[in-house]
Image (cartoon, coloured by chain):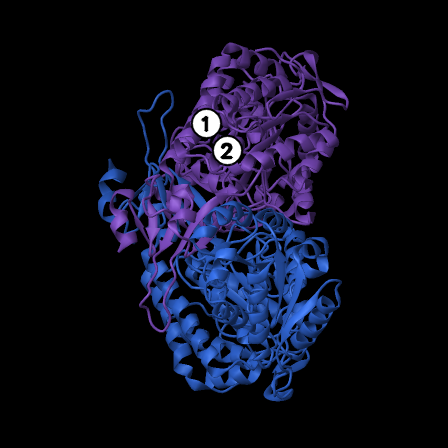
Chain colours: A blue, B purple
Amino acid sequence: MTLTGHSLIAGQAVAGEGKTTFGLNPATNEQLEPAYTLITEDQLQAATSAAAEAYASFSTLDPETHAGFLEAIADNIEAIGDDLIIRAGQETGLPAARLQGERARTTGQLRLFASVVRQGDFRGVRIDPALPDRAPLPRADIRQRQIPLGPVAVFGASNFPLAFSTAGGDTASALAAGCPVVFKAHNAHPGTSELVGQAIAKAVSDAGLHPGVFSLIYGPGSSIGQALVADPAIKAVGFTGSQSAGIALMRTAAARSEPIPVYAEMSSLNPVFVFSGALKGDVDALAQQYVAAVTGSSGQLCTSPGLLFAPVGEDGDKLAAAVGRAVSACAGQTMLTEGIAASWNSGAGALGAAENVDIIGEGTVGPTENAPAPTIFGTDIADFVANPVLHAEIFGAASLVIRYSSAEELIEATNRLEGQLTASLQLTEQDYPTAARLIPALEQKVGRIIVNGWPTGVEVGHAMVHGGPFPATSDTRTTSVGTLAINRFLRPVAYQSLPQELLPAPLLDANPWQLNRRVDGIVAEAANEKDEVNA
Amino acid sequence: MTLTGHSLIAGQAVAGEGKTTFGLNPATNEQLEPAYTLITEDQLQAATSAAAEAYASFSTLDPETHAGFLEAIADNIEAIGDDLIIRAGQETGLPAARLQGERARTTGQLRLFASVVRQGDFRGVRIDPALPDRAPLPRADIRQRQIPLGPVAVFGASNFPLAFSTAGGDTASALAAGCPVVFKAHNAHPGTSELVGQAIAKAVSDAGLHPGVFSLIYGPGSSIGQALVADPAIKAVGFTGSQSAGIALMRTAAARSEPIPVYAEMSSLNPVFVFSGALKGDVDALAQQYVAAVTGSSGQLCTSPGLLFAPVGEDGDKLAAAVGRAVSACAGQTMLTEGIAASWNSGAGALGAAENVDIIGEGTVGPTENAPAPTIFGTDIADFVANPVLHAEIFGAASLVIRYSSAEELIEATNRLEGQLTASLQLTEQDYPTAARLIPALEQKVGRIIVNGWPTGVEVGHAMVHGGPFPATSDTRTTSVGTLAINRFLRPVAYQSLPQELLPAPLLDANPWQLNRRVDGIVAEAANEKDEVNA
């Protein structure tokens, strides 16, 4: 495919009338061709109004066409081949193996959502049949379904140029819900975004869908993003990025004459709690795993562990020493952008300068540009609880080991944490009683609890929660990874006493989409339901 | 039961240290004993911290104890007997028959939520079993459930002193979710609130629950309400009332250091669309039904029809004339408060003074105080579309008949409407094609569509949606009536690789609560599931 450097608005390449920008190779700080033209707020409206026009037909698509469309996006992404991995590598500094894995995750989640669309439980059909003879008053026939919210604005994340960008989790779940998407590209990987955007646009066109189902726009960072969220045609927002940008979008959405939901995944320290039993085993292996989780993808993962609580005493000392050895063997890897590397330097500098914080170990600066030395810091739990500086997320390969003496201290420190995506426990059977006391406190602070594993490597499945209390995300009632993410883009509507001729397909007596439907409060499988509805 | 005039904080009657207030009989404008003492912001904290303390045990209650608790509240409300109907009638001016029906709805929805708690699908259990042999990477065991958000602040509505007040829909659904409730009484019916509050407190005590599970507070209207929503212990808000009060609570909740969801049900015009076919039948009966829906409960229902679209021409003229005759036979009924009656007068005055608005018919002023004459106004659709004054809700017995010429006009008028709770269609088979064109536009504006019925009389069931786009409600993704309302107070948490000893009951292999659980994306009924989880 050829890169045009243009936005892709409702199927058309549109040259932006604003400034231009370039992709940059963070390993060399060199500019990548072509130039990308940025659109103006006036041009934005073409995308949002096309999305609004596309809603009527896209939101009522039959499940088979709908699922086939999602699968075609996955096929088209695979068809780009190595060009996609090469361009993404140039724009992000991420190694090819990581990007190949991410591509598989991206196409895998599109196909998973296709299966969700075919299966259909997300339509949330509930039928309370009429009870004409009920006393004192008869009951009318009432049927409920979930409908798509409307056009969704999606913002690409810098750290997942495929899996949380153009055709990433937010786009896939919004499209699966039946919502047209206006996607704002992250300016750190414009070429990758365009390649994937073309793949989506081809799937839209091949399926004969309204071209407004998907638009890809390039714009000046915050201003066009704010204008997109403020646009009356937009009914929900998906975002992964910094806390400051996410909160700015939340404020804009809340200030609209019609406020809309914002699903922002923003920041997380992902604490790891090491219990004493876990230190009876292979402490070197534990240290290696921790350092791998901290330094993988140059630490630029939402779930990278930024805190590790380890017991005071000899065993804990051994772990700290092993962590120091492990990290000192690590070379820095190129970070996504110069700006992100600068933020890392400043955050790590502030942490290192904090009172009672020392360096447990540090690696070496990498051979490329923007590849700072991974660093593990150390402190004790009293200082951690007392000093907010030690609670700041450092996006990149840095982490803080915190020494504790008692379960009470861990519970107290947990209660002081802000909301997080994950918490991980390293333990053996002897630690179960302590862990059982800590887990209720953790449930109030995180979206996922992990035992004897590491938080990185988020599985895309039905049971995953990639979410958590504010400020980890803007809306703790949701997840941005896994099939439950589709619920973010739906709302219930009830239909009372509608004749068959006026009911939408999911609610018809004949159940043409073969949905499992909740009849009088009990889910009836499609095969067994008909008699109950007609009873 | 004896009225103390005090707040009921975690099971204790607490005299407020602020001012005092009295219930007022709106039919006579007379003061009702006893005086109610209002709490201060300092006193509020006793209620919210008790609620926070109660969370750990209440949120993990076994289903049978939990359901029995909800049923005991219903039993205790019934045990109050006629005293409740008498006091509520004195405080609200509502007739006894209406209040008896409302009491049945209140106890019915508590028992319905008890059945939801026993049935357990709201726990949203999803299990993706481990796949240790999966290539290239094994999959960990991941299990998800929904947990209660935390303590919920509930605000009583003036117009449903039982069904949307102390033990009303918001309280019932929050308690069913496992959330402790701090209930702010509406100062228009303090004695009714105390009687029901005592019934709840007795159920808490008899079940041996933490007394912080429920508190009832009396406070100065807006200030203590704002303090309650701002309190860090509170994790969600349920509210039914005016748009200005609801929006003020939304702002406070959004400005917290941890923003929380607000479920505010605020205002609705509930348009009725009369198609030409419906005018071929009994026009007098149609007019009578409309006027009954407008004037029932003195028009003080969230779903009272404030707009009726009728065709121009002879048949429409006949309907308008019949409406005029029907309303002129109606006497005013006492409104809930002097303030509400004053608002009605001012709203009806503004509508009557608007250009091209006339009076189709009006009833007579009632014999009691605060009982203005029901009034039906008329205008044409061009004026309605052009003039925002005609879109203002008038809470009480007033409605506006709008004459239209074409389906296009109806669609245009619908697109100009703000979000509403309901839309109703009066039609016959000949109108199906026109209705089919209008319904997609209505789905974007309302939460419930009704054919050949009236929006009042909201059924409490599994399929009901009492919600809709802003400003009908603050959160269009939810309903405040019906069993789906429980979802408002839940959030998902995932558990990765937890041993059986550390998993919560709903996620155990043994499935002790006999829940239907989604295994690998497919709901397995409790009876058949075990083999699949252990496979």
Q: Is residue A22 above or below residue B185?
A: below
Q: Nearer the viewer, residue B161 or A265?
A: A265
Q: Position of residue B327 (x, y in %)?
A: 55, 23
Q: Is residue B271 above or below residue B23?
A: below
State the quadrant of the N terminus of chain B: top right
Q: Mark 1–mark 2 contact, CB under 8 Å?
A: yes
Q: Is residue A469 above or below residue B279?
A: below
Q: Nearer the viewer, residue B176 or A276?
A: A276
Which numbered tag is attached to residue A360?
Answer: none
Mark 1, Cα crowd under 10 Å, few <14 / some 14-19 / many 20+, is: many
Residue sitting at x 39%, y 37%: B462
Q: Nearer the viewer, residue A30 or A401?
A: A401
Residue sitting at x 37%, y 76%: A75
Identify the secondary structure beneath mark 1.
helix
The residue wearing badge 1 is B70
Q: Amino acid at mark 1?
A: Leu
